[in-house]
Image (cartoon, helix red, strand yellow):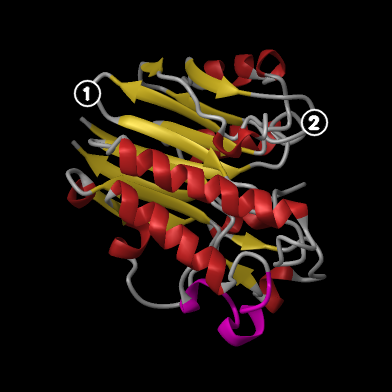
Amino acid sequence: MAFTLATWNINSVRLREPIVCKLLEEEGPDILCLQECKSPVEKIPTEAFAALGYTHMVARGQKGYNGVAILSKLPIEDVGDKDFADLGHARHVAGRLDNGVVIHNFYVPAGGDVPDREKNEKFGQKLDYLSDMRDWFHAEKPEKSILVGDLNIAPREDDVWDHKKLLKIVSHTPVEVESFNSVMEAGGWADVTRNDIPEGLLYSWWSYRARDWDAADKGRRLDHVWATGDIANAGHSSRVLRDARGWEKPSDHAPVFASFDL
């Protein structure tokens, strides 16, 4: 089975239904994983997506916050979710394709503005969430799996516009990067995007605060596609659809794509 997958923090699936449809029409990935849907599952606009061929969905939602959904042209079975760090948030869902591949869709907490868990509860929640992910993957070694989502960490120096300036900024601090790497190691995950694009600056998020995000280009790579070691070599054709950041009423994230031949 060959398929193309995309991951996108949409920042409200109902508000941005038009650009989700635009992506589905113009790019046609077989699977689209969305984060920060900000919608109860029953209010996700599934009719518009089904009309474009995306007749399958597994999702977890809540009103106004968080939320994750996997839209698929391919049959996909809901195989559950985990409430990491016991936050009571809709931040994870998993689905299994007919070929046995499990897709995990994650929205890791952003962590607030201050990288100190004593001063900022949200930063502590983020680190606890990552610790729980690490422990779960260590105990339940994933196989034949793909993990995607807004992980809210830019791990490499070339995943941010200025490594030195961002070392004390949430999403690129050493403690977050260490936690990120421990999750990868625990699950035997490989970074599909960077396997395909090993060198150079690469971003998937640009702040709304920038007057001209494109010219300023102060981005971070917060959105990721991983695969377990047993199928990582099947991943290819990774790319970031940067243009989507400039669409009408855009998300501050751009979709990240990868294809798999399995």
Q: Which mark is residue 99?
A: 1
> From the viewer's perspective, is 131 left or right of 141?
right
The stretch drawn in magenta includes residue 160: yes
Q: For marks 2 and 1, give the one nearer the viewer.
A: 2
In depth, the one of 97 and 228 nearer the eye is: 228
Is 65 situated above or below 54?
A: below
Label 2 packing within 10 angstroms: few (<14), some (14-19), many (20+): few
Q: Which residues are magenta?
A: 157-169
Is 38 situated above or below 255?
A: above
Is 159 situated above or below 260?
A: below
Q: Is residue 154 visible?
A: no
Residue plotted at (46% across, 59% down): 180
CA gap between label 2 and label 1 equals: 34 Å
In depth, the one of 27 and 83 nearer the eye is: 83
Residue plotted at (40% across, 58% down): 182
Q: Is residue 156 visible?
A: yes
In depth, the one of 244 and 178 nearer the eye is: 178
Mark positioned earlier in the residue sequence (2 or 1): 2
> From the viewer's perspective, is 259 left or right of 155?
left
**Residue designated by label 2:** 64
